[in-house]
Image: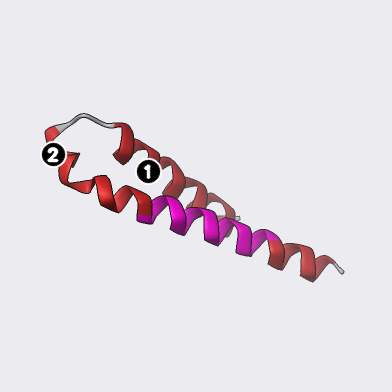
Amino acid sequence: MLQIILPIVFIIFGIFLKKTTSPGFRNSKKLSNVFIILGISTLVAKIILIYIKSK
């Protein structure tokens, strides 16, 4: 279950970093893309592994 929740948290945090206007997070705009890509790739990989394991 953690393998599904953690990528979703990464994606949400990446979107938060991209959309926020707080001066403390202003330097993290480039890092937001890394979090989004990491979350999507991890989520897709886990879904593929679940599909392969179910066969």
Query: Which residue is the site of mark 1?
Result: 13
The answer to which of 31 and 24 lies nearer the viewer is 31
**Image vertical order of residue 44 relative to residue 52, above or below:** above
29 displayed left or right of 10: left
Q: Tell me, for residue 5, which label it has, or none.
A: none
Tag 2 secondary structure: helix
Residue in the picture at 62% in, 64% down: 45
Q: Which residues are magenta?
A: 34-47
Q: Position of residue 23 (x, y in %)?
A: 12, 34
Pointer 2 local density, CA inside 10 Å: few below 14, some 14–19, many at least 20: few
Three-letter amino acid code of the residue under disc 1: Phe
In the rendered structure, does residue 27 fall within the stretch colored magenta? no
Q: Position of residue 13 (x, y in %)?
A: 37, 43
46 displayed left or right of 11: right
**Image vertical order of residue 21 relative to residue 55, above or below:** above
- Classify residue 29 by image quadrant: top left
43 displayed left or right of 15: right
Sequence-earlier tag: 1 or 2: 1
Q: Quadrant of the C terminus?
A: bottom right
Cα separation, mark 1 vs mark 2, equals 15 Å
In the rendered structure, does residue 38 fall within the stretch colored magenta? yes
Predominant SS of the magenta segment? helix
Query: Which residue is the site of mark 2?
Result: 24
Residue in the picture at 32% in, 32% down: 19
Q: Residue furthest right?
A: 55
Q: How many marks?
A: 2
Residue in the picture at 62% in, 58% down: 44
The answer to which of 47 and 32 lies nearer the viewer is 32
